[in-house]
Amino acid sequence: MSFVYAEKKMVIDQEIITIHCDTKIGLLDGAKAAFCEEELDLIEKYGIVKISNLGASISVAFAGNNIFLAAKLFSQLCELKTFSVVEAVERAYAIHSGAKSPSDIEFIICTADDTIMRIDCIKDGRVQKNCSSAWLGSYEAFREFQRIRMSDPEKDPTELTDSAFESVVQGCPDDSVGKFWISASYRPDLKCFWYSERLALHSVKKQTVKVGETIKFFLDPSDGGYSYRLIPCGADSLLMDIDQMEPMILFSRAHRLLESNNNPNHFGLMLPMLVKQKENEEIVRCK
């Protein structure tokens, strides 16, 4: 399924929008024909980023069993060249309501500029307009997420959003949610939506630590532990540098494997690619 969450919150006396997603994705057998063997292997290992920053003032997140319907929306909006929030929501609703099942595709459309911060949610056959927060995908993931966010009565739930989302992605009762935690926010300083830079540690096993023993922040690779950095490469690409492996992972809607460069089913999707950094710091695709 997926898990996606967006909310408005105050940061240093300024309201911003932040969107979160996991990267795990399950492809139906019929959908696998749209990808080459290398792409299928990468998607199985790393998933896809379900947030696409389509312009400075708009970011679209999605969940569902048919990711090609998200590509259809991105393609339609690109063909329009210029469009209003209302037009974007109408196109998303038409695709959602025209799908075989409501769970095939759901959307959160976030728009922002100097005067407006807006979240619109398209799911369950209807449009929820101008929400303060919205979620898509797994109800089990959302329920656990909310339990963690509400666990400290002395804190505003927005203070625990990041840690709660990361916890759910790393250990959700719904195994259709997982892989990596990715987020994007509207950056008033850059006047655009931007992927979040982050250093993250991941452990899949719990530790029992006695008094006086050293706490390991992440376990050895043999136990499934790893650490990684997320590095934005413009509004349309995100680099993941995992310390325990040499190639890096580039999630991008601007760069494609040659085998699928013109595939309309991929349009606007943040797909993975293995890359490396040369001595001159140039990033190139791994062969």
Image: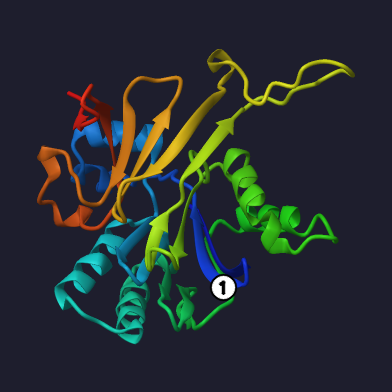
Q: Amino acid at mark 1?
A: Glu
Does residue 42 appear in this view? yes
In the image, residue 37 lies at what x, y percent? Answer: 21, 32
Residue 274 against residue 173 in the figure, above or below = above
Q: In front: 41, or 223?
A: 223
**Can you give x and y, in whole percent of width and height, for residue 118 in the image?**
47, 78
Mark 1: give few (<14), some (14-19) or many (20+) Cα within 10 Å. few
- Residue 100 found in image quarter: bottom left
Residue linked to disc 1: 15
Model colouring? rainbow
Task: Point out the image quarter for the C terminus.
Answer: top left
Q: Is residue 82 above or below residue 46?
A: below
For residue 204, above or below residue 129: above
Q: Position of residue 44 (x, y in %)?
A: 37, 35
Looking at the image, which residue is at 41% across and 72% down? 109
Q: Residue at x 52, y 41 (%)?
A: 178
202 and 204: which is toward the camera: 202
Q: How many discs appear?
A: 1
Q: Nearer the viewer, residue 236 or 273?
A: 236
Residue 92 appears left or right of 103: left
**Relative horizontal placement of residue 209, taking residue 17 as reference (left or right):** right
- Residue sitting at x 40%, y 77%: 113
Pick the residue in front: 279 or 220. Answer: 279
Residue depicted at 25% across the width and 29% down the height: 281
Classify 172 as above or below 248. below
Residue 246 placement (x, y as % from top left): 35, 20
Can residue 104 be seen here? The reply is no
Q: Tell me if 3 is positioned left or right of 62 in this view.
A: right
Give the quadrant of residue 96.
Answer: bottom left
Label 1, secondary structure: give it. Answer: strand
